[in-house]
Amino acid sequence: MSVGQVKPGVLTSPKPVQSVNAAQSANAMPAGFWGAVGEENVTTASFATSGEAASQTHALRGRTLNVSDASDLRLRRKEVILTFDDGPAPRATSLILAALEKFGVKATFFMVGKMANAHPKTARAVAQAGHTIASHTHGHENLTGLGTVEARRTVAIGESEIARAIAPTGKKVAPFFRFPYLAQTRALRADLKDLGLVIFDVDIDSLDFKNDTPEIVLKRTLVRLEQEGRGIILLHDIHMRTARLLPELLRELEQRGYKVVHAVANHRALFDTPLQASLR
């Protein structure tokens, strides 16, 4: 399936995704989740830190892709878009930013509004580094459990919170959105598209939320990438295991001849329009 292609019927990511357990089936993350992010006890083993030497030629850096619709997310063979969900989280996000800088590549960060509120300095660091800032609702709500008006409202509030956090940088939130849990319906997708949002799906799910070692997450991600040959990679910048494995993932991508594409917006985000105020 090509990047961004949609299956008929009830929609999820084109690839296998995280199942929603009993705790996650509510419209918010489990109690204590946000306070625990980035605190996993991770075995780093042979994984290098982001401070170690990386390629100075930035061979991994690919083209800039202007996106105004999901149909624009067409990648060539050996091209990937790196995406990070659920942050920002000071410890993990900072390490991730350092690794991306070492390799000279840009990513898209799908921030949760309440996380941007809690950690505005980290949110601003992402924006100042030139990465694309996108939205992921106010509190990681499962939108399939909400009515249309309430779903719109949490999306709009989330964008507004992120916009406020990064405002001192002069940067804007891109009109890019990813459904929490990748849980969506055709009606929800169509409604958010009508509001001007570009929905990002997933081609390679790292499943880095699982309590696996960085080695396992890396191997799983690379195996799935080699099967696809290109695609949008899903990672999370709230997990230290992800921050620890990222330099090695970037090295592997470079050695295998991949290019990291930077997706940028061609039009304004929802919060930049009069509609946003009416949804609050």
Image: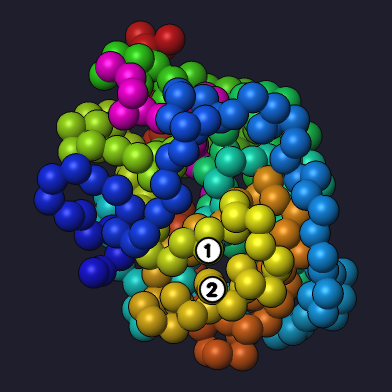
Give the residues in magenta. 129-147
Determine whether 1 is above or below 25 in the image. below
Q: How is the image coloured?
A: rainbow
x and y percentages locating residue 38 in the rendered image? 76, 45
Q: Residue at x 34, y 61 (%)?
A: 15
Assess disc 1: are there few (<14), some (14-19) or many (≥20) residues with their C-alpha within 10 Å of its C-alpha.
many
In the image as oriented, which residue stretches furthest toward the front?
22
Q: Residue at x 31, y 29 (%)?
A: 144
Please state which of residues 54 and 11 is positioned toward the viewer in this rendering.
Answer: 11
Three-letter amino acid code at the position of disc 1 = Ser
Q: In this image, 191 relative to 276: left or right? A: left
On the question of residue 131 being in view, the answer is: no
Please state which of residues 278 and 155 is positioned toward the viewer in this rendering.
Answer: 155
**What residue would you read off at disc 2?**
220
Looking at the rendering, in which quadrant would you find the N terminus?
Answer: bottom left
Give the image quarter of residue 161.
Answer: top right
x and y percentages locating residue 35 in the rendered image? 75, 30
Q: In this image, 270 relative to 241: left or right? A: left
